[in-house]
Amino acid sequence: MSERRATRQRRAPPRTPPSVSSDALLADLVVELRARGGRLTKPRVAILEALASAQHHVTGEELAGIVKQVQPSVHAATVYRTLDTLEDIGIVYHVHLGHGPAQWHLTAEGHQHLVCEQCASVFEVTDEDFAPLQTRLADRFGFRMDPRHFAVYGLCAPCATLADQGRAPSVRTPRARR
């Protein structure tokens, strides 16, 4: 892992590259929604706007709260139905990071997750890190892996070192961002 450029964090960093504003990303998402046959409604625009400006992965509940501030008439059920629709047409996807609720992000933000079972740190790694495994599974079994909906669990380098020394932390508490 020492060669990998993974970021230890509880929340993902901003997804929008510094050169792309959330307004430009929103415009791209609206075009993408229409191109994929999706209807453009006020609630959907508010949801896409919230996703475009999110600085991290968001749960459906968090997203509903953000949307409610802008569009008070939008019910949480609408947010969840819209997330399902946006996932069906390929604009967003969800991942399960532990036993909590699903975390949502835009499909253009392709990355995978490594979760430390001891300290609960989350590392984002590029899709390229999974490419050899995807190739091997395809070659051996004809299986096309889609790693987006799950996280890989194990021990981060500091926790693995402590475990090797017999000094692993006894409590699973998320570490502060470093």
Image: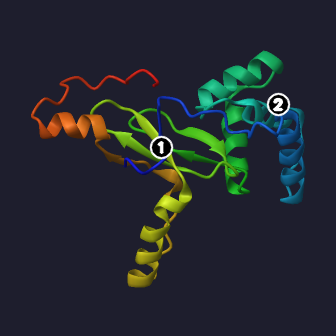
Q: Position of residue 151 (x, y in %)?
A: 43, 48
Q: Which mark is residue 46?
A: 2
Query: Does 83 sit left or right of 73 as displayed?
Result: left
The quarter holding residue 155 reads top left
Q: Quadrant of the C terminus?
A: top left
Query: Which residue corresponds to the image point at 68% horizontal and 26% vertical from the top-left?
Result: 64
Query: Which residue corresponds to the image point at 71% horizontal and 56% vertical from the top-left?
Result: 90
Residue 136 higher or lower than 146, as above or below: below
Query: Does 59 sit left or right of 167 as displayed?
Result: right
Q: Which mark is residue 6?
A: 1
Residue 142 higher or lower than 18, as above or below: below
Q: Earlier in the sequence, mark 2 or mark 1?
A: 1
Residue 148 higher or lower than 156, as above or below: below
The quarter holding residue 65 reads top right
Instruction: Kindly identify the amino acid type of the residue bearing the numbered disc 1.
Output: Ala
- Using the rendered image of the protein, determine whether residue 113 is visible from the camera's viewpoint: yes
Q: Position of residue 118 (x, y in %)?
A: 27, 33
Query: Which residue corresponds to the image point at 48% horizontal and 59% vertical from the top-left?
Result: 129
Secondary structure at badge 1 equals: loop
Q: Nearer the viewer, residue 158 or 135?
A: 158
Q: Position of residue 130 (x, y in %)?
A: 47, 62
For discs 2 and 1, the disc positioned in front in the rendered view: 1
**In the image, farthest residue toward the left:** 166
Label 2 Cα neighbours within 10 Å, binned few <14 / some 14-19 / many ≥20: many
Query: Which residue corresponds to the image point at 38% horizontal and 23% vertical from the top-left?
Result: 175
